[in-house]
Amino acid sequence: MRKRRIKKFVLPTLFVVIGVSLFLSAAVLNSILLSDELNYDYSKSLMKDATQAVLSEQKEDKTKQEIYKPYVSENVEVLVSYYDKDASEEEKEKSLIVYENTYMPSTGIVYASDEEFDVIAVMDGKVTNIKNDDILGTMIEITHDTNLITYYYSLKDVKVNIGTSLNAGTILGKATTNNIYGQKNNFLFEVYYQGKSLNPESFYKMNELQ
């Protein structure tokens, strides 16, 4: 059988073709990688700007939402504290509401004074309910957002209606007497966050975190 010889120019040409192909492939791959890196950096920049904008907006909202105590009189004192199961026995005893020989843990704070005093909204919100409680008298419910609701029991001379939008510090009415504490002017203030009662004292301290 007769053998054929590979011509001398074939191998150099083949090497050149392979080299050019590898070079072009590397160039294309590098271009793709650089493009992805630029897009990634650009996306990170957009996300950073958006995050800063949201945080800035939240900060502004918190600044506007200063939390007030629900009264302004200097003669108001705490009659019954919020019941904390982890408190001392002495503190727990001071956090019980006694009615007809029945002891009930206080889910808020009872404020009282020998003089009449105004009760005010602690934050901006909307009046979502007003009703009469058999034990504590007239109650006002204010919804501040989907997670936060405050309640004010034992009021008279109510100055708001259901559906009223109000600002922090708006007068809701006056503290009055009720079936529990007789002739002493008082009212019960409750805070509920995500459906669970919150110690109002902890609620006020949120001002320090804003």
Image: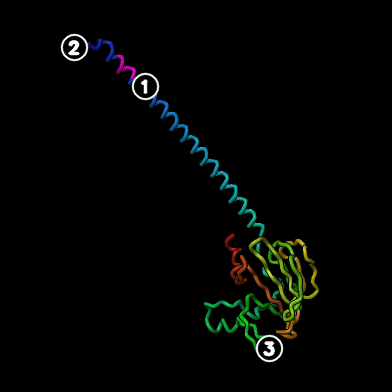
First reached walking from the N terminus: tag 3 or tag 2 = 2
Q: Residue 175: where, in percent of width, then height?
A: 74, 76
The front one of 92 and 163 is 163
Give yes or no for contact between labels 3 and 2 (Cβ–Cβ under 8 Å): no
One can see residue 199 in this view: yes
- Which mark identifies residue 100? 3
Q: Would you call the spot at circle 3 few (<14 residues within 10 Å), some (14-19), or many (20 or more)?
A: few
Q: In which quarter of the image is residue 188?
A: bottom right
- Which mark identifies residue 75? none
Q: Residue 87: where, in percent of width, then height?
A: 53, 78
Q: Residue 207: where, in percent of width, then height?
A: 61, 63
Q: Is residue 12 above or below residue 162?
A: above
Q: In which quarter of the image is residue 69?
A: bottom right
Q: How far apart are marks 3 and 2 (CA)?
A: 122 Å
Q: Mark 1 points at which residue?
A: 21
Residue at the extreme left of the image, as rendered? 1
Where disc 1 sits, the SS reads helix
Seen at 61% across and 53% down, the residue is 58
Q: Distance between the residues labelled 3 and 1?
A: 95 Å
Position of 105 with respect to 129 (left or right) is left
Tell me the quarter of the image containing the N terminus.
Answer: top left
Q: Would you call the spot at circle 2 few (<14 residues within 10 Å), some (14-19), or many (20 or more)?
A: few
Residue range of the region highlighted in magenta in the rendering: 13-17
Tell me the quarter of the image containing the C terminus.
Answer: bottom right
Position of 185 with respect to 199 (left or right) is right
First reached walking from the N terminus: tag 3 or tag 1 = 1
Q: Is residue 117 above or below residue 164?
A: below
Q: Mark 2 points at which residue?
A: 1
* Main secondary structure found in the magenta portion: helix
Q: In this view, does 52 lie above or below 205?
A: above
